[in-house]
């Protein structure tokens, strides 16, 4: 009975963790890590119990082995976006086949085994959806599904002076709320500041960040469109608009914005890195390799899944 309760609590923690990270709620990664670790341990214990019961390799034992492996692989995929390889996909495919055979042969199953199977299926299908469908990327918050999502975006370190002191006061309060993930409350303060100083590009930029965090990318882009109308010489405006277009799976528009950002600030390594990812999406591999190399020349030194994938293609 305790084992069932623990499993259900861990799966609930996983669901809350995924939702929290998708909405930028603090400590969501810690909750995900704890939940994944707990589910892996639960599966290991179940595997040892199954082996002791049968003392030979059979279908139930084989299924338990793959449930342990699948739990580890899914934790790598969702926590650090790793193990997305031919071997990784082959393991998941084989696991699904074994799962199907097992349930076709067995007439009755324990609720825990059914629950963990459904849990794995949901995670696998969601990941497949992210990989193949831009529409799914727009519907489900996906800042965690690649290393790019809002990576390299800027928080307004550039200086735009305020003419109205009250507008500046509301803007500073809004930034504090934004930094603490209170996006809806921050929007209200930014709009109050905007009523006092409607032509300040920085306020539209701030609003765009709030809407992006709330996964309202169309509004985020619209705010940056207006910011650029107010001031078209700030590279961060174009860089972030490129990020939002990329997040909407529109790599063509993302590339256009990254290139404008690079024209305004050619020494920013993140601009070249993000451009490389968008170029890779459009299968312009030669240009992607050059952009990635340029980002490294400027100091970008992160070794993540996507950079390794581009490196492999460049060789």
Image (cartoon, rainbow, N blue to C red):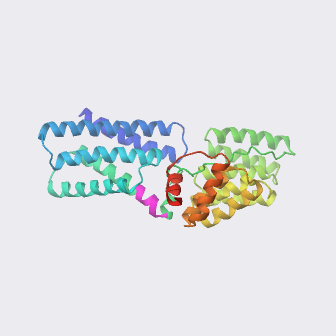
Quarter location, residue 189: top right
Going by the image, does 165 lie left or right of 263?
right
Which portion, as a residue range, is magenta? 126-133
Q: From this viewpoint, is residue 185 visible?
A: yes
Going by the image, does 239 lie left or right of 41?
right
Of residues 228 and 4, which is closer to you in this image? 228
Q: Residue at x 66, y 49 (%)?
A: 297
Of residues 16 and 271, which is closer to you in this image? 271
Quarter location, residue 155: top right
Q: Residue at x 38, y 52 (%)?
A: 123
Quarter location, residue 34: top left
Q: Position of residue 278 (x, y in %)?
A: 59, 61
**Residue 41 in the image: above or below residue 103:** above
Residue furthest toward the front? 315
In the rendered view of the protein, which quadrant contains the N terminus? top left
* Prevailing secondary structure class for the magenta stretch in the rendered image: helix
Q: Position of residue 199 (x, y in %)?
A: 82, 54
Residue furthest toward the right? 163
Going by the image, does 143 lie left or right of 75?
right
Residue 132 within the magenta-colored segment of the rendering? yes
């Amino acid at each position: 009975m305790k084992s069932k309760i623990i499993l259900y609590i861990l799966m609930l923690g996983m669901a809350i963790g995924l939702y929290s990270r998708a909405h930028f709620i603090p400590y969501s990664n810690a909750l995900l890590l704890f939940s994944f670790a707990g589910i892996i341990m639960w599966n290991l214990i179940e595997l040892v119990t199954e082996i002791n019961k049968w003392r030979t390799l059979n279908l139930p034992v084989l299924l338990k082995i793959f449930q342990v492996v699948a739990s580890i692989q899914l934790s790598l995929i969702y926590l650090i976006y790793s193990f997305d390889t031919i071997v990784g996909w082959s393991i998941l495919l084989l696991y699904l086949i074994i799962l199907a055979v097992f349930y076709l042969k067995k007439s009755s199953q324990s609720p825990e085994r059914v629950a963990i199977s459904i849990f794995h299926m949901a995670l696998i299908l969601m990941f497949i959806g992210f990989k193949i469908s831009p529409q799914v990327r727009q519907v489900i918050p996906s800042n965690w599904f690649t290393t790019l999502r809002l990576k390299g975006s800027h928080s307004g370190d550039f200086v735009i002076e305020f003419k109205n002191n009250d507008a500046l006061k509301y803007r500073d309060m809004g930034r504090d709320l934004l930094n603490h993930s209170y996006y809806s409350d921050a929007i209200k303060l930014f709009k109050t500041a905007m009523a006092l100083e409607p032509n300040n590009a920085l306020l539209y930029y701030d609003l765009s960040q709030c809407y992006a965090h709330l996964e309202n990318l169309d509004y985020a882009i619209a705010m940056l469109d207006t910011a650029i109308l107010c001031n078209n010489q700030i590279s961060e405006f174009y860089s972030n608009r490129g990020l939002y277009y990329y997040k909407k799976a529109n790599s063509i528009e993302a590339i256009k914005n990254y290139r404008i950002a690079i024209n305004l600030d050619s020494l920013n390594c993140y601009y070249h890195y993000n451009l490389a990812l968008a170029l890779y999406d459009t299968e312009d591999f030669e240009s992607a390799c050059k952009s990635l190399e340029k980002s490294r020349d400027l100091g970008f030194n992160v070794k993540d899944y996507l950079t390794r994938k581009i490196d492999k293609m460049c060789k």
